Amino acid sequence: CSRDWSSDVCSSDLREPLLGTIEIDVVRLDDDLPAKPDFLKIDVEGSDLQALVGAERTLSARPLMNLELHNFLFESRLDTVRRIFERLAPLRYRYAVIPRIEDGIVDLGTAVDVERMAAWDNPHVLCVPE
């Protein structure tokens, strides 16, 4: 499957030591979700940016969103986190984050310090429309 998600559907081989090879179909969120969802939970194990790219129409409805970032899986943490929040910026969200499971919620307001966000391995970001 191409990393730019230019096609609507792609097949990907997933190699699981106990199960062998599993083929899965990948679809864009815009092709699989109702026009205006109220809530969106994105937990895609490192394909966070690709999921957002495939959800342009869905995100334009500005749903309440829980975005679980897998920074530890990104080739370039800072670049990927920056690109994620550049994509979200025009949507006018207010952000709160749980940096680590043992941490409380941190209110970030409307601006995200991407360097700080990229430093956390697996932050959970709540995106609330303003």
Image (cartoon, rainbow, N blue to C red):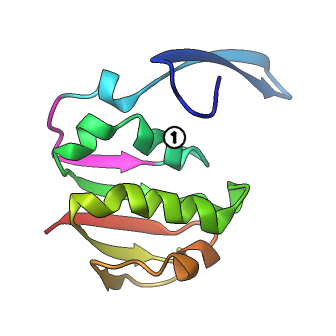
Q: Amino acid at mark 1?
A: Gln
On the image, the x and y values in percent for residue 40 come to 29, 47
Q: Residue at x 64, y 26 (%)?
A: 2
In magenta stretch: residue 75: no
On the image, the x and y values in percent for residue 116 come to 55, 82
Which quadrant: the C terminus?
A: bottom left
Residue 61 occupies quadrant: top left
**Residue 102 vs residue 55: left or right?**
right
Above-or-below relation of 47 to 5: below
Q: Residue at x 34, y 58 (%)?
A: 88
**Residue 55 vs residue 116: left or right?**
left
Above-or-below relation of 36 to 27: below
Q: Which residue is mark 1?
A: 50
On the image, the x and y values in percent for residue 120 come to 60, 75
Q: Residue furthest right?
A: 17
User: Is residue 68 visible in the rendered structure shown here?
Assistant: no
Q: Residue at x 19, y 28 (%)?
A: 34
Q: How many marks?
A: 1
Q: Which residues are magenta?
A: 35-42
